[in-house]
Image: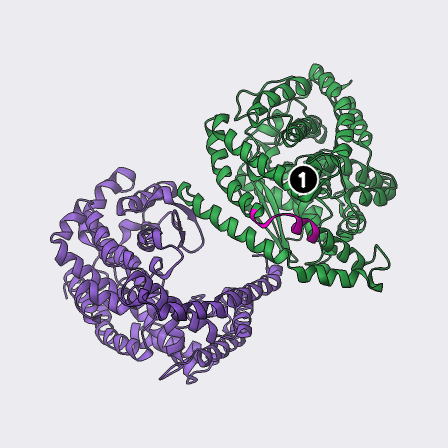
Chain colours: A green, B purple
Amino acid sequence: MPAAGVELRSEQLAFLAGLQHDRATDPRIGELLSVLEGSDLVSDPTSVPAVNVREMRYDYERDTRMPRALAAELARTTALAHQEWVAARQDADFTRFRPWLDRIVSLKRNEAEAIGYTREPYDALLDEHEPGMTTADIAMLFTSIREDLVPLVADLRDAEGQHSDGILHRDFPVDRQRVLAEGVAASLGFDRGAGRFDTSAHPFCSGIGPGDCRITLRFRAHDLSEGLFGVLHETGHALYDQGLDPAHHGTPMGEPASLGIHESQSRLWENLVGRSAAFWEYLSPRLRDLFHETLPDANALELFRAANRVGASANRVRADQVTYNLHVIIRFEIERGLIAGDLAAGDVPAAWNEGYRRYLGITPDDDAAGCLQDMHWASGLIGYFPTYTLGDVFAAQLFAAASSELGDLEGLMRRGDFRPLLDWLRRTVHRQGRRYRGAELVQRATGRPPDPRLLTSALRQKFGELYGL
Amino acid sequence: MPAAGVELRSEQLAFLAGLQHDRATDPRIGELLSVLEGSDLVSDPTSVPAVNVREMRYDYERDTRMPRALAAELARTTALAHQEWVAARQDADFTRFRPWLDRIVSLKRNEAEAIGYTREPYDALLDEHEPGMTTADIAMLFTSIREDLVPLVADLRDAEGQHSDGILHRDFPVDRQRVLAEGVAASLGFDRGAGRFDTSAHPFCSGIGPGDCRITLRFRAHDLSEGLFGVLHETGHALYDQGLDPAHHGTPMGEPASLGIHESQSRLWENLVGRSAAFWEYLSPRLRDLFHETLPDANALELFRAANRVGASANRVRADQVTYNLHVIIRFEIERGLIAGDLAAGDVPAAWNEGYRRYLGITPDDDAAGCLQDMHWASGLIGYFPTYTLGDVFAAQLFAAASSELGDLEGLMRRGDFRPLLDWLRRTVHRQGRRYRGAELVQRATGRPPDPRLLTSALRQKFGELYGL
């Protein structure tokens, strides 16, 4: 957007937020829900009508507790803050963003008070993105993960350098990378006739609705990882969106369960499929065909090792599978402190750098590479980051359950037969819509409640073997 | 959009059309307008409040006469028809599009009946795009233009081949064409801080509102015309949008007067500036700098001649300045016949080819190159084409008036000083918003009612000289 357009944009978004609030909080919705809640239709709590009524009630209550003026003000402020964040990051000047962060935190605290919570205001914000999960649940999970990963990262740091990833940094013409990416998406099960690919500054996936799911990617000529792991990740999101039941479109039974569950799908395909030895056995002959001049010698093991190079860096989006969740945990701890009032906006850079020092043993070069790297806070997304790591926890558990049910999942992947895994996810996750909360969905799919040790022990095993720990 | 997404899109658009209808026809608007219409505020009919009340009443009456269900049905049908048109054009298979055209014509006839008209139903459709103008007005203008242009095209056909445009078809690297295009837009007065440039399949300009006006372009490596005349045309639209008074944004006084007036701005900058000898004198040293390998020898006269090569072709968008309006007249005659019921959808290909034979002396290779080339009818845009030629009529007259008021306009253009012309247009056209209907706006700006002979005599003079007629 041109710089001069931000005022109009912020007014438009505030206006739309008001309209949306009017529609979502129409008292008629509450009356109709009350009628349904007293009917036989909802007697089986996991039936389609009961789920729809329960979830519509959940949305309605949340929306009606949110003041209309606050919804509009948040929309207006975050539109303006986004532009200030862009400029602040460009100049690595946190002081420019600080008053906006301060204002957003204050509005989000107002939101939390309006929505209500039992133990701490952050609960109210988290619940928007991961319904049913509390701050205490997250803190417990994250403490466990942190206590496992910090020593693992330290161990790997000493072992680091063992495998070079130079093979992924040769010359890869972008047009052929695009052919590769689209082919990989199709082989995983993406329905191209009901979707499309585009290029953007940051990859994302938009599930518009039945028949229309769009993936954006970016490529770098000297880095195969950027485009390849981008398409694996976004295809994971897309397969979930394309797997929602079109017959339930527009109702909770046709919607994703939570952000954590959504992220479990992207992380599963990106990491548990895409960074596995089996996947690289499948992929390497294809790579040799496509990039015969660049990779005449590509062998699966070398590529697999290169794709799993570990090293602490300041950047979350490009982080490896092991360090990634520590980036998320640092953000969670800071935003929880901001919302609790234990931390002021001005304290963020120091808290950020201290987190990176303690958990990853590094210090970002400046605030652009540090606390200004993500757009989430500028967009008012507080309580969103934890769902990234929740996604990893859910993914590890779902993948383990799928493996034991499907038998030789590794063999299937080696042969490029991803259909059984997709079918399993379709049945246990995609087609369930919002029938269960995230944690319950995982429990029903896998037979046990979410357990972070499955994630961390799998990481220690995989990377311990790779790095000879 | 992916093929499978069209059903959802059509439902969404129909839903939005219904919502929009509800808001636009809220009886409260009518009540408030009645109060205002009885007040002193509107005593001076060209004052800002009087114009706003008059034009809001015009919109309100039109909107309320349109049945809600018809508005939704048109949105739904045209979304589906667009996709069928794409496929039909791809296969050069008019029969695939015929039932959709039939359905759209029938809906537009219903619309015309609902809106009301005095002489013929087409009036009602035309009035949406060019308020105040009747079918009879257009027919009279177009007859005059056709009678002047058909013989001129025939004369030029015999003289054709005299100037080669090979110089515009050398190797022009697209990245440098982009630099040229953005530089040209800026030199004409486009405010880049309040706008941006992108690439698209077909160039267009979107005036989002104050501070945000976007131009899209396309480039061809071996055709300088495509990108250059594209940017000249779209910048003309953009200068109008950027010239609307931001203090009146959201009210008629801050809106364009009509499509004909909008097109007059794009055609004026594209043709009367961009295809003038003076402009090429200004541009040629810049071209030599940018494309020093391609155009070391470029001289202004040769470039000017190349930019004014005339030749009948089947394609409207790429037509030259002389033949362009005959393309438009053919479309007007056909769509007028469709709405009057004199022509059936199935008659269109024959009527089209007959029009091209009579007015341009050519026959399109197939329906893809013929009656399927434009997306307008598939989008329900009937009564829209005439505004293209109206734009040319208005542009010729505005440019002549500006020339005589500004004195040495040619000299200004030769020196690249476009500001006086822009300021003149700002004052006489842009800042007037919807104060006057298109024809009256032109009359007030130029001192005489729209006269098509100004357009055609200027064309005969310019091309007569160029081609030695």
Indicate left or right for B430 with A257 as reference.
Answer: left
Horizontal and vertical percent for residue B287? 26, 42
Viewer-proximal residue, B205 or A285?
A: B205
Q: Is residue A327 above or below residue B444?
A: above
Q: Tag 1, which chain?
A: A
Residue shown at 43% from the left, 73% from the top:
B62
Which is the main secondary structure of the residues drawn in magenta? helix
Q: Residue A155 location, x and y as percent?
A: 74, 16
- How many callouts does the rendering have? 1
Residue at (37% x, 65% y) in the render: B315
- Which residues, given as a range, are shown in magenta? A60-69
Helix, strand or loop at label 1? It is helix
Q: Quadrant of the N terminus of chain B?
A: bottom right
Q: Quadrant of residue A357?
A: top right
- Using the rendered view, name the quadrant where residue B6 is placed: bottom right
Q: Which residue is found at the position 21% from the left and 61% from the top? A: B398
B70 with respect to B387 (left or right): right
Furthest residue in direction top, as rendered: A158
Which residue is at the front of the view, A219 or A265?
A265
Picture quarter with the C terminus of chain B: bottom left
Q: Is residue A11 above or below residue B377?
A: above
Whether B115 is among the magenta residues is: no
Relative to residue B68, is residue B118 drawn left or right?
left
Residue A63 is one of the magenta-drawn residues: yes
Q: Is residue B179 visible?
A: yes
Residue B293 in sight from this viewpoint: no
How far from the left and from the top, in percent, is residue B347? 45, 81
On the image, numbered disc 1 is attached to which residue? A125
Q: Amino acid at mark 1?
A: Leu
Q: Residues within 10 Å of mark 1 (few under 14, many from 20)?
A: many
